[in-house]
Image (cartoon, rainbow, N blue to C red):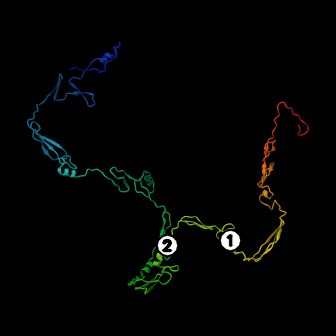
Amino acid sequence: MAVSLKHTFVSAIPDGSDTSVVRPSNWNAEHTLTGTISTLMGFDATGASQSVTVGSGLTYSAGSLTASGGSGTVTSVAALTLGTSGTDLTSTVANGTTTPVITLNVPTASASNRGVLSSTDWTTFNNKGSGTITSVTATAPVVSTGGTTPVISMAAATASVNGYLTSADWTTFNNKGSGTVTSVTGTSPVVSSGGTTPAISMAAATTSVSGYLTSTDWTTFNNKGSGTVTSVAAITLGTAGTDLSSTVATGTTTPVITLNVPTASASNRGALSSADWTTFNNKGSGTVTSVTGTAPVVSSGGATPAISMAAATTSVSGYLTSTDWTTFNNKGSGTVTSVAGTGTVNGITLTGTVTTTGSLTLGGTLSGVDLTTQVTGTLPVSNGGTGAATLTANNVLLGNGTSALQAIAPGTSGNILTSNGTTWASTAPAVPAVPAGASIYTSNNFGGF
């Protein structure tokens, strides 16, 4: 049988004159496939064509594939013999010709055997849970968010946090020294001389020094009496005195102790009476919410006020400083019994004498006052002044009633003072209009035309 191949696509382009190249008619023609004698053609898993060689027991001729060899007819097959030996499925054949006997070994499945599942294991496995995780917890330093899809995490280890060692800390720790001691200090009563080879010491304990117990002191303390008390009477309570006090009678092995607890009062330190308890309990809670101060005392206010007072001066009321106390203390007793007044200044005379009570008389007419040295301030218009401390140079002064004088600046060069009927102003002079054709006569006299 001839096998041919023809392209699906047929070219309609006519052939050219060059027969040495593949022409459209060559492409459109049916092609006959040839192969090696006594071989078959097949296709592999990728679809590529392959030559199939005829193996032993087969004969290929004239397009026919024929099996050769013995007839191999099976006349009897026994039922499978089942066994459990081994660790995996195995089979053996006895009498493997016309009457084969096949043995199939199927061991019981276990942690080491591949085989069938026993009924016991089936029950065990069937009783197990479905295996679904419902919650996952963690023990520090491991942390879990919980639930069926937990996020497991661990913080980086620090001086206060247990966790994993970061690469940076690993490098730091790895670079540390072998642990050689470079300095040792001591905390009292232990004393260290310091450095890499310190001398550690401790003083012997005394009444004023903390330290170790010497053998001598040990013997002294050990030889002291055991002080065993064989009988103690109940404490006798009293109320005598103004403070807590106690006395002991028979202060050896059978002491009798009297404890005086007076009732607390303004003068006694002692137990609070029920009457006072009721009185104190009925008082307010006493919580300070705001504190103010009355001069000269000053308070910053609020529940935690800062209370202060300024030092007293000639203008400030306050506390007396130690410096001022010394100054005042050094002054004489200075009781004044009589004050006389006499003298004249610029025509004003002071006369009279005051003892315990009375008045000084001031009289005369003021005169000879030096306005430069004896007068301060600005003299108002009502007292004959200008009401101004300074006057601008070259300004014209105008009256302003009892108020300070007004001033008019010169303004533009050529300006003149003009009145608007109410006040004066510096304005440019008005030029009268000259009718057309009018004659202007001039005169040599100043100001005439």
310 horizontally vs 137: left or right: right
Q: Is residue 128 above or below residue 431?
A: below
Residue 192 location, x and y as percent?
A: 49, 67
Residue 356 location, x and y as percent?
A: 75, 77
For the point 43% across and 56% down, the residue is 158
Q: What residue did someone put label 1 on?
A: 324
Task: Give the image quarter of residue 160.
Answer: bottom left
Q: Looking at numbered disc 2 in the image, what kind of residue is underneath it?
A: Lys
Q: What residue did someone put label 2 on?
A: 283
Q: Looking at numbered disc 1 in the image, what kind of residue is underneath it?
A: Asp
For the point 10% across and 31% down, the residue is 71
Real-space CA distance between mark 1 and mark 2, rounded to the nearest whole angstrom: 43 Å
Q: Is residue 272 visible?
A: no
* Of 440 and 212, the residue lying toward us: 440
The quarter of the image holding the N terminus is top left
Mark 1 or mark 2: whose residue is earlier in sequence: 2
Q: Residue furthest top?
A: 17
Which type of secondary structure does the marked residue at label 2 adopt? Answer: loop
Residue 256 location, x and y as percent?
A: 42, 85
320 horizontally vs 3: left or right: right
The quarter of the image holding the C terminus is top right
Q: Is residue 86 above or below residue 58?
A: below
In the image, which is nearer the foreground, mark 1 or mark 2? 2
For the point 82% across and 37% down, the residue is 432
For the point 77% across and 77% down, the residue is 355
Q: Residue furthest right?
A: 444
* Of 250 and 219, the residue lying toward us: 250
Q: Is residue 352 above or below residue 170?
A: below
